[in-house]
């Protein structure tokens, strides 16, 4: 059966958090997202408060439960603040739902038409690994701020966007024996392809290592690395995530920028914490990646990593976890032709993460 629909990209990423109002303030002041919509008691939602924030093509939804018995509270107890739903924008939500469920996907919500004065959104949701879900969102007949059930809400503070454009990729961490199974599931159920792989021969430090398979949809607007730990002398960052998240889940979200130096400098001024990179990395950089447009001294000042493949190079930097549990973090990425994910940086990245793990007593 051929696909009669298309995924055009990531529609939104839905986080379950302990205090959505405060989290919304965090993403406005530190990451430059503007508040665009709200749902809660005032809009008739008696179950949860949800704030929608946007920067260019990136939408995030932050939700907190009102009631003790809420399923969202169960999610918070198990996982802490984290991603519940990576929603995909599609031209036919019902066809997408039918395609994947006929291949074995478990339905969370059948295709549902949501209406208000601004039009209609068609949405369906299926289960993926752990407690994570994917919603399929069709919004070609909707002119409102986000979707029915939400009202327009604007930031009360002066928000300065920092140049983030779209979701480049998102990463799912898996327990030891699940990576191949999950990658195959996306291939067989979604019809996606294997886009890129690394194994522990490529990514290893003295103590830890990782294996990763990247799956992508046909037009490559959705890319998802799926990670698992590989055998090492100590607990890897993948194992630490799985332990503190109580199972598999979204480890990090990579956000695209056209000017990583400007974006990272503003993020640091806003108080965002990044992993630290030793100066020796930059001494070896010219010999490893060749000529680049950027001033290496500026990259060293900000801790920005560089890697190259046969198509070009990329620049990237990773935040520290954005909540107290050592789980979810963000990547800032700028691509200059490179289609990979920074394999040449993984060793430096892992060593930086291991220094943080050691400070937490988790290495």
Image (tube, rainbow, N blue to C red):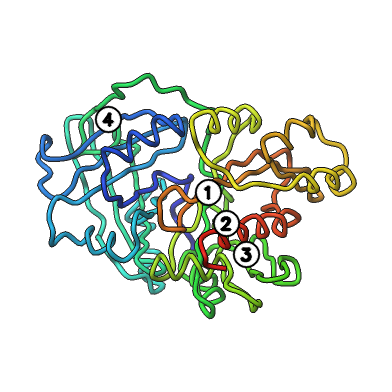
Residue at 64% x, 70% y is 211
Residue that mark 3 sits on = 194
In the foreground, 258 or 87? 258
**Residue assigned mark 1:** 320
The reply to whether callout 2 and callout 1 are in contact (CB within 8 Å) is yes
**Label 3, label 2: how far apart the Cα atoms are:** 31 Å
Q: Nearer the viewer, mark 2 or mark 4?
A: 2
Q: Which residue is mark 4?
A: 144
Reading the chain from its start, which is encountered first: label 3 or label 2?
Answer: 3
Visible in this render: residue 1?
A: no
Q: Residues within 10 Å of mark 4 (few under 14, many from 20)?
A: some
Residue at far right of view: 287
Q: Residue 160: percent from the left, percent from the top? A: 45, 22
Residue 79 falls in image quadrant? bottom left
Residue 218 sits above or below residue 209 on the image = above
Seen from the viewer's position, the closer of residues 343 and 133 is 343
Q: Quadrant of residue 104?
A: bottom left
Question: Disc 3 or 4, which lies upstream in sequence?
Answer: 4
Q: Position of residue 55 (x, y in %)?
A: 44, 31
Q: Earlier in the sequence, mark 2 or mark 1?
A: 1
Which corner quadrant holds the C terminus? Answer: bottom right
Density class for disc 1 (Cα within 10 Å; few <14, some 14-19, many ≥20) is some
* Residue at which label 2 appears: 356
- Residue 184: which numbered mark, if any? none
Q: CA distance from mark 2 to mark 4?
A: 43 Å
Q: Is residue 318 left or right of residue 118?
A: right
Instruction: Out of 340 and 30, give the one closest to the viewer.
Output: 30
């Amino acid at each position: 059966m051929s696909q009669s629909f298309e995924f055009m990209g990531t529609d939104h990423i839905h986080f379950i958090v302990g205090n959505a109002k405060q989290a919304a303030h965090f993403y406005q002041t530190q990451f430059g997202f503007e508040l665009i919509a709200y749902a809660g008691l005032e809009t008739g939602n008696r179950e949860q408060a949800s704030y929608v924030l946007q920067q260019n093509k990136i939408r995030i939804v932050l939700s907190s439960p009102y009631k003790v018995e809420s399923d969202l509270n169960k999610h918070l107890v198990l996982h802490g603040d984290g991603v519940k739903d990576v929603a995909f924008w599609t031209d036919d939500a019902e066809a997408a739902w039918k395609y994947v469920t006929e291949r074995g996907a478990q339905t969370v919500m059948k295709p549902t038409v949501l209406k208000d004065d601004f039009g209609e959104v068609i949405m369906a949701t299926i289960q993926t690994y752990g407690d994570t879900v994917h919603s399929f969102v069709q919004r070609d007949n909707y002119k409102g701020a986000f979707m029915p059930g939400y009202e327009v809400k604007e930031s009360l503070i002066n928000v300065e966007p920092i140049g983030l454009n779209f979701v480049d990729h998102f990463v799912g961490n898996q327990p030891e024996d699940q990576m191949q199974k999950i990658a195959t599931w996306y291939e067989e159920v979604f019809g996606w392809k294997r886009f890129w792989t690394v194994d522990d021969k490529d990514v290893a430090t003295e103590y830890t290592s990782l294996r990763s398979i990247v799956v992508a949809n046909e037009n490559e607007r959705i890319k998802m690395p799926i990670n698992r730990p590989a055998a090492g002398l100590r607990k890897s960052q993948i194992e630490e995530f799985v332990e503190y998240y109580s199972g598999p889940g979204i480890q990090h979200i990579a956000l695209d920028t056209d000017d990583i130096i400007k974006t990272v400098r503003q993020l640091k001024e806003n108080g965002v914490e990044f992993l630290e990179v030793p100066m020796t990395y930059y001494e070896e950089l010219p010999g490893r990646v060749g000529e680049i447009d950027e001033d290496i001294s500026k990259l060293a000042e900000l801790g920005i990593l560089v890697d190259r493949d046969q198509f070009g190079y990329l620049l990237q930097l990773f935040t520290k976890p954005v909540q107290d549990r050592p789980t979810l973090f963000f990547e800032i990425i700028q691509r200059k032709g490179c289609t990979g994910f920074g394999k040449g940086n993984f060793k430096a990245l892992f060593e930086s993460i291991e220094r943080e793990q050691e400070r937490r007593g988790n290495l």
